[in-house]
Image (spheres, grey):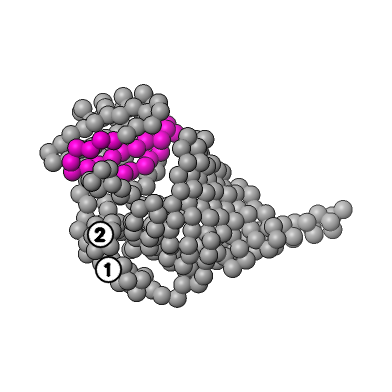
């Protein structure tokens, strides 16, 4: 019996060591890929992207439904359209970034090896993440289930990336010295109430605006639209909206939670 227990312990230890090496390979890989992002819940959404990823840097080109490019480099975040980029004062995180952050903060909840691939589960306050990673350390699928919404990131094609960040950035005319988007203090105050957020651009009518999708610390989804002009922001069923106008800008805060909206209103009135 003792020999059997020792054997089991050795096997478990060996699997743990190999698993850690496998995760390290995933975290340190550089790759180029095409991927599809889908969101299923109250509303269904999808987009197609090209992604260039290095261990600490990333460039993402959204191909559909709108043209958008964003990048992170040396701790800075850049976003916009070709020849019209700005440095964002806020983090820009995709599902892969969120998975990696929770992987490092919370750790792995469960790992399985299935047909030569690894299924990695991370159960965190930011959602239940499940990732499928192949034997080369490249991601094939990342899924997050959170607040009744399932977001799925499927990599259709992934290949090694030998080009450096600067080489790919020059292809898109991305320059680290781009002008920063200066968000007003109201948005910075709002972001103090959330646990994570992502930033993107979209058009409402003819006006290009900034959309911040955030997870309030209560667990409620929060949307913030920032525009230099007044725009007609549509809300979904059960959503409420609070509008805040400044000198030369407009902020629209949208959520389904009355208490969250009340909290933000009190925060902005201070």
State if disc 2 and disc 1 touch (CB < 8 Å). Answer: yes
Q: Secondary structure at mark 2?
A: strand
Residue at 51%, 41% (x, y): give it: 40
Rendered position, 152 above or below 169: above
Residue 194 lies within the magenta run: no
Residue 222 lies within the magenta run: yes
Residue at 65%, 61% (x, y): give it: 117
Name of the residue lying farthest toward the front: 205
Say left or right for 59 vs 101. Answer: left
Question: Between disc 1 and disc 2, whose residue precedes?
Answer: 2
Rendered position, 138 above or below 254: below
Whether residue 14 is visible to the viewer of this picture, yes or no, is yes
Which quadrant of the structure image shows residue 141?
bottom right
Q: Position of residue 86 (x, y in %)?
A: 24, 57
Instruction: Find the magenta span and give its range.
Output: 210-233
Checking the image for residue 85, the label placed there is: 2
Rendered position, 162 above or below 96: below
What residue is shown with label 1?
Answer: 173
Taking depth in this image into account, of 160 and 110 the one nearest to the observer is: 160
């Amino acid at each position: 019996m003792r020999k059997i227990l020792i054997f089991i312990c050795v096997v478990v230890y060996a699997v743990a060591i190999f698993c850690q090496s496998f995760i390290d390979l995933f975290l340190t890989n550089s790759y180029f890929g095409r991927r599809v992002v889908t969101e299923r819940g109250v509303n269904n959404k999808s987009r197609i992207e090209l992604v260039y990823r290095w261990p600490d840097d990333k460039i993402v080109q959204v191909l559909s439904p709108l043209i958008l490019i964003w990048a992170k480099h040396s701790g800075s975040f850049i976003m916009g359209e070709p020849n019209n980029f700005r440095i964002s004062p806020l983090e820009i995180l995709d599902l892969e970034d969120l998975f990696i952050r929770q992987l490092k903060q919370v750790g792995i909840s469960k790992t399985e090896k299935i047909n030569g691939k690894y299924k990695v589960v991370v159960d965190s306050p930011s959602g239940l993440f499940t990732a499928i990673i192949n034997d080369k350390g490249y991601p094939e699928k990342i899924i997050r289930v959170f607040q009744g919404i399932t977001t799925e990131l499927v990599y259709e094609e992934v290949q090694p990336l030998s080009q450096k960040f600067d080489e790919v950035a020059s292809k898109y005319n991305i320059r680290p010295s781009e002008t920063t988007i200066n968000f007003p203090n109201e948005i910075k105050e709002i972001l103090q109430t959330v646990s994570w957020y992502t930033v993107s651009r979209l058009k409402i009518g003819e006006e290009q605006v900034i959309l911040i999708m955030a997870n309030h610390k209560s667990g409620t989804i929060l949307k913030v639209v920032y525009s230099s002009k007044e725009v007609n922001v549509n809300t979904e069923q059960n959503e409420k909206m609070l509008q805040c106008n400044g000198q030369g800008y407009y902020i629209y805060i949208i959520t389904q939670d009355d208490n969250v909206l009340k909290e933000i209103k009190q925060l902005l009135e201070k």
